[in-house]
Image: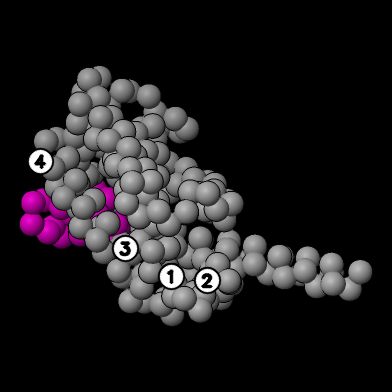
Amino acid sequence: MTGIGYTIPAVIAVILVCAWEFGILHTGLLRKPGYWISMGIVLAFQIVVDGWLTKLSAPIVLYDDDHTIGVRFPFDIPVEDFLFGWAMVTAVLLLWERQRPKADQADES
Amino acid sequence: MGHWEYLIVLAACLLVTAPLEFFGTGVYRQASRAARAILPVAIVFVVWDALAIAGGVWTYNPTYVTGIHLPFAIPLEELLFFLVIPLCGLLTYSAVNATLARLRRKDDRKARRR
């Protein structure tokens, strides 16, 4: 339950993604309502998919409790997974935004 | 499902999100832009995955993976995870933005008619 192996890297990943956007990229992604709506949808699907991958009755991925804070919610999802998932998806969306074609600016898609 | 289970979960993610391609300008139709968004992040997360596996932070249940491994004991399914899930995220974001733009245009038309 030290959190050394997963909790700390997961928190750092979130901080790095924020620093990347606010310090370097300045895409404005995190100020767009479309981003937060999308992340809400992604979160709902993460609970289903990640819940399946981590369910303790028949787990596909097994975590060493020594490396997490030991909180698994909802279902049996280690809470660190939500930081991991947020950092991964947000980083990809940031690169996608940065490469927005000029003609596409108005359409926002 | 056995050894195919993790692969089937990933395939289901692709199947469920596929229709989102048709909401707006799409993601599959901008494959190189998608690759330039997904691949650099995937490389970082694959390295993280390899370190976590090496450090025993997490492991994969041999019952539910094919047993095909990449270097550093990374299951094939994990590499695919870092491609499939971000792709699903992009499809969601693209579809949400297209829907918001459509609603905005509809509002504009209504406002002009008034």
Residue linked to disc 2: A105
Residue B52 visible in the shown view: yes
Q: Is residue B43 above or below residue B59?
A: below
Residue located at (59% from left, 51% from top): A33
Query: CA separation, marks 1 and 4?
Result: 37 Å
Mark 1 near mark 2, Cβ–Cβ under 8 Å?
yes
Horizontal side, residue A77 vs residue A74: left or right: left
Give the residue type at disc 3. Ile
Q: Same chain for labels 2 and 3? Say yes or no.
A: no
Residue linked to disc 1: A100
Mark 1 Cα shell of 10 Å, populated few (<14), some (14-19), many (≥20): some
Give the residue type at disc 1. Arg
Residue A29 within the segment the image draws in magenta: no
Q: Chain under label 1?
A: A
Callout in the foreground (4, 3): 3
Q: Chain under label 2?
A: A
Give the residue type at disc 4. Ala
Horizontal side, residue B17 vs residue A63: left or right: right
Q: Work out whether residue A45 or residue A52 is closer to the camera in this orientation and state it.
A: A45
Residue linked to disc 3: B38
Mark 4 near mark 2, Cβ–Cβ under 8 Å?
no
Query: CA separation, marks 1 and 2?
Result: 7 Å
Residue linked to disc 4: B54
Give the residues drawn in magenta, as a range: B63-82
- Secondary structure of the residue carrying tag 3 is helix
Horizontal side, residue B101 vs residue B81: left or right: right
